[in-house]
Amino acid sequence: MSFQIGDTAPDFEAETTQGRIKFHDWIDDSWAVLFSHPKDFTPVCTTELGYVARLKPEFDRRNVKLIGLSVDPVENHSKWALDIQETQGAAPNYPMIGDPDLRISKLYGMLPASAAGDASTRTPADNQTVRNVFVIGPDKKIKLIIVYPMTTGRNFDEVLRVIDSLQLTAKHRVATPVNWKPGEDVIIAGSVSDEEAKKAYPMGWKALKPYLRIVPQPR
């Protein structure tokens, strides 16, 4: 099964490095980032997990919970964390899901339903589609899906930037333009009529085209 933006993120129960969780209950009223890994002790993922650990205060500031997933069992994650600490200067400070039966990877459409076998016998190439980022809102809806190849490290600064946009546009009827960063001008949403916009933005806006109305970022 594949998912699209706006679909409800599947709920599940799983063992993690911080105990057993029920996913929707764990998210509670926060945002969440679920990011998956095809195998423990893989080089690109090692760099990612350490970087996300260092970046965690920025996610915390945005009320975003982080959770990783790898197809190997939880006890392997704990051993991998030692390598991540040694090589990256920070070990995962967020839960890591164990998925040795591939149940969650298949639930989220990262592996085909026919995938089977013990995770320990599978290679990273067998699981190469398990390189996803899912951003999930407090309403448990999927807000963003990014799928990366095995050889390209993920850009978690970009994930933060998108979350800033998602949180802003969830609160205000605006959209963010190309390469937008917090504090920069935004676009009045196309669903907002000029009459509605006059009430929301009494100081007016810059209209490059009738459909392209630029205003300062709402606070």
Image: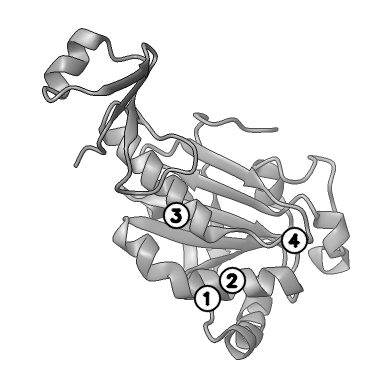
Instruction: Report the residue marked by disc 1.
Output: 92
Q: Secondary structure at mark 4?
A: loop
Determine crowd level at label 3: few under 14, some 14-19, many 20+ residues with C-alpha closer than 10 A: some
Mark before the other along the chain sequence, 1 or 4 = 4
State how far apart marks 1 and 3 are (Cα).
Answer: 17 Å
User: Which amino acid, by three-letter code, is at mark 1?
Assistant: Pro
What residue appears at the point 59 percent right and 71 percent down from the top-left corner? 49
Contact (CB < 8 A) between labels 1 and 3?
no
> Circle 1: is it few (<14), some (14-19), or many (20+) Cα within 10 Å?
many
Q: Residue at x 62, y 61 (%)?
A: 69
- Can residue 43 be seen here? The reply is yes
Give the foreground label among 4 and 3. 3
The mark closer to the camera, 1 or 3, is: 3
Q: Which residue is mark 3?
A: 160
Q: Which residue is mark 4?
A: 38
Please say whether residue 138 is visible from this viewpoint: no
- Which residue is at the front of the view, 76 or 57? 57
Label 2's element?
helix
Q: Quadrant of residue 75?
A: bottom right
Task: Kindly check if marks 4 and 3 are in contact, taking CB atoms under 8 A apart as contact.
Answer: no
